Image: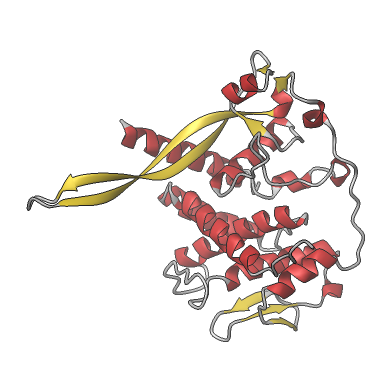
Amino acid sequence: MKNIERQDVYTRITGQIIQSLEQGIRPWVKPWNIDNTTGRIVRPMRHNGQAYSGINVLMLWSAAVEQGFTCPVWMTFQQAIEMKANVRKGQKGSLVVYANKLTRTEDDGEGNEVEREIPFMKGYTVFNAEQIEGLPATYYTKPEPILTGPSRIDHAEAFFANTKADIRIRGGRAYYAIDDDFIAMPPIESFRDAESFYSTLAHESVHWTRNCKRLDRDFGRKAWGDQGYAREELVAELGAAFLCADLELTPEVRDDHAAYLASWLTVLKNDNRAIFQAASHAQRAVEFLHGLQKPKADAA
């Protein structure tokens, strides 16, 4: 039964992602299409302020857009009750998942006890703060408008500089050259705004983490456009979306949007775990990039 439940979670979530892609919507980018005067989209957060990660970010961003939520906070029915609040009658919850491993001691058939790790996944339901009555007023406060100018963004400049990646400003195409281990970027002046430059750099920086000197990520890519290529591009897409949320940047939708959608649909339809794996790799890449940042000076 647990196996069936886990498979159902994979199938349900993958099906939702496929449905969005078939409509030409990238669920990890769609939230950013909301007018920025409503405030920056951030990662979804639990009731205690802890940010969601991996596949749950995609699912809750998608749910927020579908239902028109601007508050990033989500909680279970029971957590709302514990805060002396209540979910409004008739509200539809949103699916998130919890994955972990169990350690079980077993007999190896020769009289020896061995420990075996068994991965498991379960789904549960959460509600957005806007579906709940009686929460503290801070949960219902709308963010201040944030308008972006064309100038360089200091905190983004510092973030990418701290990675120590070899970033070369050259030509009119952005890419990561794995053999020579450098990121090529067009000049910032060639982008329509500064955020488009940094979001593209975020995408290429996630590719940069795949090198064997870093996370050694390899999906068996043999040629441009094959399934290995599509999987790596999906990781870079998701990683860039996660990183842009962390840096308060707007993700860039690439010119080759339609071609990527087609290749991702092929991958997802053939493997209902692919989006989970891509989100996991993307999360790992973003955490790696965050880990390269300069430690904060100790307080005096």
- Give 212 or 27, whichever is nearer the viewer: 212
In x, y percent, where is residue 123? 47, 34
Q: Residue at x 49, y 43 (%)?
A: 14
The image quadrant that residue 17 belongs to is top right
Residue 259 appearing in the image: no
With 97 as the anchor, is 155 left or right in this view? right
In this rendering, the answer to whether 181 lies above or below 117 is below
With 10 as the anchor, is 242 left or right in this view? right
Residue 274 appearing in the image: yes
The C terminus lies in quadrant: bottom right
- Give 272 or 47, whichever is nearer the viewer: 47
In this rendering, the answer to whether 27 lies above or below 194 is above
The image quadrant that residue 88 belongs to is top right
Q: Residue at x 71, y 54 (%)?
A: 246
In this rendering, the answer to whether 284 lies above or below 67 is below
With 112 as the anchor, is 137 left or right in this view? right
In x, y percent, where is residue 141? 84, 32
The N terminus lies in quadrant: top left
In x, y percent, where is residue 16? 54, 39
Q: Residue furthest bottom?
A: 180
